[in-house]
Image (cartoon, grey):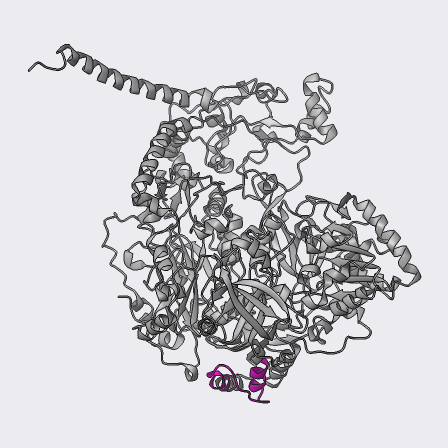
Amino acid sequence: MSVMDFSAIRSRLAGSEGRLYWRSLGELADTAQFREYLHREFPEQASQWNDPQGRRHFLKLMSASLALAGVSACTKQPPEKIVPYVRQPEDLVPGRPLFFATAIPFGGVAAPVLVESHEGHPTKVEGNPQHPASMGSTDTFTQASILTLYDPDRSQAVLYRGEFRGWGDFLSGVKNAVLDQQATRGAGLRFLSETITSPTALEQISLIQRAFPQAKWHHWDPAIRTADAVYHFDKADIVVTLDADFLGCGPASVRYSRDFAARRRAGADAEHNGAEGDAAKPMNRLYAIESTPSLTGAKADHRLPLRASEIEAAARALSGSGSGSFSNQDAQKFLDAVVKDLQAHRGTSLVVAGDYQPAAVHQLARALNQTLGNVGSTVTYAAAAPPENAEPVASLRELTQAMDAGQVQVLVILGSNPVFTAPADLKFAEKLSKVGLSIAHTTHPDETSSLCHWAVPEAHPLESWGDARAFDGTVTIMQPLIAPLYDGRTAIEVLAAFIDAQGGKSAHDLVRDYWTRAHAGQVAGWTITDPTGQPFKSADSMWRHVLHDGWVPGTGAQGSQGEGRGSTPAAVAAPGAAAPRTADNATPATGGLEIIFRPDPTIWDGRFANNGWLQELPKPLTKITWDPSAWIGLRTAEEHKLNDGDLIELKFRGNTATLPVAIVPGHPDGAVTAFFGYGRERTGRVGQPAEDVAKAFNAYRLRTSDALWFGSGLEISKVGRYTLARTQEHHLMEERNPVREANIEEYRKDPEVIAHLGEKPPRTLTLIPEWEYTGYKWGMSIDLTACTGCCTCTVACNAENNIPVVGKDQVNRGREIHWIRVDHYFSGMVDNPETFHQPVPCMQCENAPCELVCPVGATTHSAEGLNDMVYNRCVGTRYCSNNCPYKVRRFNFLLYQDWNTSSLEPLRNPDVTVRSRGVMEKCTYCVQRINYARIDAKREDRKIHDGEVVPACAAACPADAIVFGDLNDPESRVTRLKKLDRNYGLLEDLNTRPRTTYLASLRNPNPELETARPAATSHD
Amino acid sequence: MSQIFHRSTNIWSKVSILGALVFVGFLGFVVVTISWSGYVTGQGITIDQPVQFSHAHHVGSMGIDCRYCHTTVEESAFANIPPTKTCMNCHSQIWTNAPILEPVRASYRENRPLQWTRVHDLPDFVYFNHSIHVAKGVGCSTCHGQVDRMPLMYQENSLQMRWCLDCHRNPAKYIRPRDQVFNMAYQRPADDPGLGERLVKEYKIADAKQITSCSTCHR
């Protein structure tokens, strides 16, 4: 790769006429590598076609394959078995999936879901539409959790010092250890867990504490701050974030995205056609004051990049209790404008403090909301913040000190991986060896379980009975979809081993017992009523009702609170002598750069390292797959002479780690963001670092307890180069205005402003004969105003359509198979650009260029306007892909599907063909779902209702940005959306007549802060 | 200058060109014959099963309705192969000691499913749905033949795509009144040639363009 010329980038941007949308710095600098991507669809090995030697080889292969082509058609199908039930379960209709409501906890907080089950094996996770925390949507992690269930690398058996043992052996081992503890009233007994919201488990903990008053509970979560506030974005006109990424991550992000996007959309279209939502509400305005660029910042109307250490000063400036000097010269003007806007919206504004900011910022935000009168309207605070929020490491530090002093005889580590994730200065692994008996309860063999005496496999949530609370407190009782594939146990069963009365009981019995008592009013804090407020007839009817619906009515924020609402075991344990108070982000002025820590956007704190879907999911904003990166701003890169893909060594507080560089426009200067989660030493096949150098990509090595989220004094030095598999420059459509956007004011003044950004040729200008669609006419609308760029659609599509994982090497060659990709564009100046996301599935063109060039008729037009892809006809010429202006067709260059791993077989959607090598594939609008609904409707002699067919991407979308339906139905939601003035087709000047169209991105900037920007102009 | 080839070679070259064409044609004929034959399609071939279940006996002689065993044929893509329990509904009372039924009893006793071999096996990229065909008046025997006369089950038709398309292009030729769908011996009334067209209209069967779209069956 040629070295980027930064000055050329700046001058190009400065000299550009009109608005310029760019994908990457490489595009702006016009590097050789970028040109290669642009001109060849699949750059690697493409040169073979021009090379006479390669051509001859190709012809030889072609003649051989032609000769064999006829033979292959004669293959006989091998005989297949039909295995009916012995006793068929009631309600089960073979060939029709069943859906069960349950929850998948993430960091202890429930994500409520409906899981699709085909004859007893779960295949797809959907949100629970009735549940207030989901509204039918999910996040990426929840979508991908189904792959973890079938992961062949999961822990499969109870191990003691690495040898196979049974569950019975474990129970007796625990019994002996507990007997020893009785004399000292549990003084040597310690538990370490993430946040636990399960009422059953919390009761178990209190039982354990009653039996062993000296036992202690410790809390450690490397990435999630225990929530102590619930925000109501549906009521907020002005939102100010202080390094908060409420759209991108956290257990509440699904609901927050939904509320936020609804307000944006309602405001955008209120005066136009009144198509959607509450016309009385104006479009909300989002100010993001943030360090590391986030999805929330990308959605913001105004974004102020500051170093993480400056956020507190910004918060003070907002509350009028001080004004600091900032590294960003625009800061003061920005903050003044925000203050003015906040004052003008008392009671309807909202200040959100970020999970990655210290307690002081949260207190400032709380005080601000208090003064602005927002508490109770746009935000609800918990009565008391959990203690770990003030000092996230205190509890873990206390544990390691006790371990070091030899005071810990029995340590139970539930569902976390502290050996990998604990701050480096605590030296957890070293001290673990001083523990008498250590027990790890983990899903995969990991760094912690390999160092513990007992390793107990953790059952996947879809195999477990249990309970958990959503971010708003609503309880879901979790039911298993499948019997444990391996010898997995739930945390409740592990805890039961420590309680005399419960030892050896199943999780089902324990959970059911708890809720039966809760129903009878025997558990303090619960009043269980049915949705109408009446008591249930019996415990049995309550049990059936809550399992069916997926949540216990009346347990949300407004309902009964129960024991330990939103609190953690740490609150129960109440550590006696708290460690000396230190701010968790003391920043001694030692100069150097600032380091900012963030969990990886896709594999999180490292727990999803073995999940191929998440590894291959392009990370929002950088589109890097399979690797972590260190983000730096453009100016800092210039100063240190760094380029994308340079390997740097980071030195911080005496520790070192290596990371590849990604230059991220909009990153604050003088700071480096290091993402932790990679560099796993012990994990499955997928998560294992592929190259030796990648073993040092572990940012946890730098993370210390006094600089949990940021700290200054970082030194960096370039140590080499590294190849990052980055999809940011893949599938380019060149400079053709793929994204259209306007300000809400511009749009109100002139609704045609969006249409003027492109050219729409007259319908008659085509050689293809006109066709009238008389039946259904499927179409999709994607709202760029709502889309947050979270990429949940991509993972949902993976799960629904049996899309294979191709690996880093293939991604690097531009061969990723994602049917729906999320393109990412920048606009404006490189130091703080505006960011746009655009999901791109197949456009299902009415005049489809791909169909005309297929020599074997493998891609044809259906009567309903779908652009059908027939795998069994495809011979792999790839002409269609070459002729597709949207670059949405994907080719199986190799046999990407794993046909050998038997545990992956039940994962596949039986309604979608599993593609083999050498065929083209692409988005089908989830035709299996269309056919399913069409057959049901025809059988019942009716039309398909609007909203009956929901493609996987639309169902998963937290922002409800994707809407699908029948364009021949004038009342359908999609038809109404397409009538909006901001509707436009991608590259519609080509007259492809795409069925998928976009609603332009609208922003609501503050006129005071509007810098003069080039007016949007039509394409040249 | 004398000619290089003797005049008689003309006839030889003509014969060999013609022969080559005939040979290629013959080869094509062989390939097509094989691929349309029961050897490839499985048409007309009985398959070994764990129990020699006779449809002729159960349907033909006893008169058991198709849906007693194939319970989901009206509501699902899959018609259902009956669970062992269905067999035992009767065979716990009659023929309780018949050796031929031992695999069934063993299955019920040991809670171990019977493993049948598929007779009608479509390729994995084809998605056939029983319920819609039954609802639109395609009789069981139209595709499966007169099962009530089959002591051992075999595939009556080729199940090749051209066979499917024969009906999808012109359903009027094959469909029957809904109340006759499960009638094995149904014959189209000779005195009512317009019946098919009438039923197509009455049952709102989509036009050929729609039901021959690729994604109707392939996805």
In depth, the one of A292 and A210 nearer the eye is A292
x and y, in percent, of residue A445 in the image = 68, 50
Q: Is residue A560 visible?
A: no
Instruction: Tell me where residue A59 appears, x and y as whole percent.
Output: 32, 35
Q: Residue at x 36, y 62 (%)?
A: A31
| Front residue (pair A376, A463) | A463
* Residue A513 vertical position relative to residue A587 in the rendered view, above or below: above
Residue A457 visible: yes
The residue nearer to you, when weighing A131 against A74, is: A74
Is A315 within the magenta?
Answer: yes
A650 relative position to A205: left or right: left
Residue range highlighted in magenta: A312-336
Q: Quick one: which residue is furthest to the top in this view?
A: B8
Q: Is residue A631 left or right of residue A999?
A: right
From the image, which quarter does the C terminus of chain A lie in? Answer: bottom left
Question: Depth check: A52 or A837 in front?
Answer: A52
In percent of width and height, residue A615 lies at: 54, 54
Q: Is residue A641 magenta?
A: no
Decide if residue A508 is on the left or right side of residue A752.
right
